[in-house]
Image: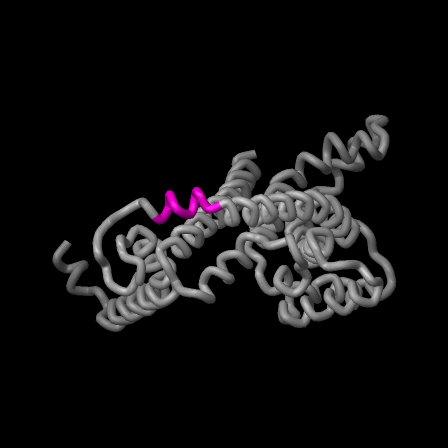
Amino acid sequence: MSRRRLNVNPLDYSRKLWMRSAMGFTFFFLYFPIISLIIFSFNDSKRNITWQGFTLKYYEKAFNNNQLHEAFANSLLIAGISTLTATVLGAMLGLALYRFRFPMQGPYEGIVHLPIVIPEICLAVAMVAFFATVEVPLGLVTITVSHIAFSIPFVAVVIRARMAGFNRSLEEASADLGASQWQTFWNVTFPYMKPGLVAGALLAFTLSLDDFVITFFTSGPGSTTFPIKIYSMVRFSVTPEVNAASTVLIVITLALTTLALWVQSKSQRNESNA
């Protein structure tokens, strides 16, 4: 054992140490602001500058804030409708891109992915210009339509990636056994799509629940969402109540993201064991 330890290459050891240090610094840089926000949400101080002690009163204050309740209800309503619609349309789009071949398919796929790559502020301005052109008043409807528009490509990408490993011979075998197209889709294709549908729906829900820029531009009177309400509270001062409300949103987002990753990993394990 001692000889093996002496034969360790010092260059490999230093390289591993450097990589671990770089990863540690990166994680610290990315997550320290979030960790500090969560910690100071329990701070017993109105100014929220120095630690004064542990308390839960600001969570209670945020829980009893009726305006936060209304904003959170609006966010859940918008996220629920946009997720359901975007999941259905995105699944159809992803399945169509996987199954069919047609002229100009490459440029069309690039256009489909535009909402993912273009700056969100540009998409928000485009949405406002569109609603102004068709003379639709800004409110919950315009926010929901905007969220559906930018969520569809994310769902389509997930479904397209999921269907890339699908064995088309299973559909052919189902057709040979006398099943109709609908029976083949429901009993063969849909079960394979289901993990992608769940992951895409959770991704769309998270994006809609957290969105601020597009929501800020397309919202109107009486359509305040949770992120916009937190922003309006931050404009006055960053209090522990703001940190408490932000922590709740972070926990919900993290839980949904973890659930999506768990569904994907579980489906991959089931496929590898099959």
Q: Nearer the viewer, residue 148 or 203?
A: 148
Main SS class of the magenta portion in the image: helix
Q: Nearer the viewer, residue 230 or 12?
A: 230
Boundaries of the magenta span = 58-65
**Residue reaching furthest to the left:** 2
Counting from the top left corner in percent of width and height, residue 227 is at 53, 56
Asked if residue 64 is among those painted magenta in the image, a careful observer would answer yes
Image quarter where the N terminus lies is bottom left
Q: Is residue 47 visible?
A: yes
Q: Is residue 193 above or below residue 10?
A: above
Asked if residue 35 is among those painted magenta in the image, a careful observer would answer no
Residue found 65% across the figure and 48% down from its top = 78
Q: Is residue 104 above or below residue 156?
A: below
Residue found 57% across the figure and 34% down from its top = 274
Counting from the top left corner in percent of width and height, residue 200 is at 62, 47
Q: Nearer the viewer, residue 108 or 168?
A: 108
Residue found 73% across the figure and 66% down from its top = 128
Q: Is residue 244 above or below residue 112?
A: above
Relative placement, left or right, of 233 versus 25 is right
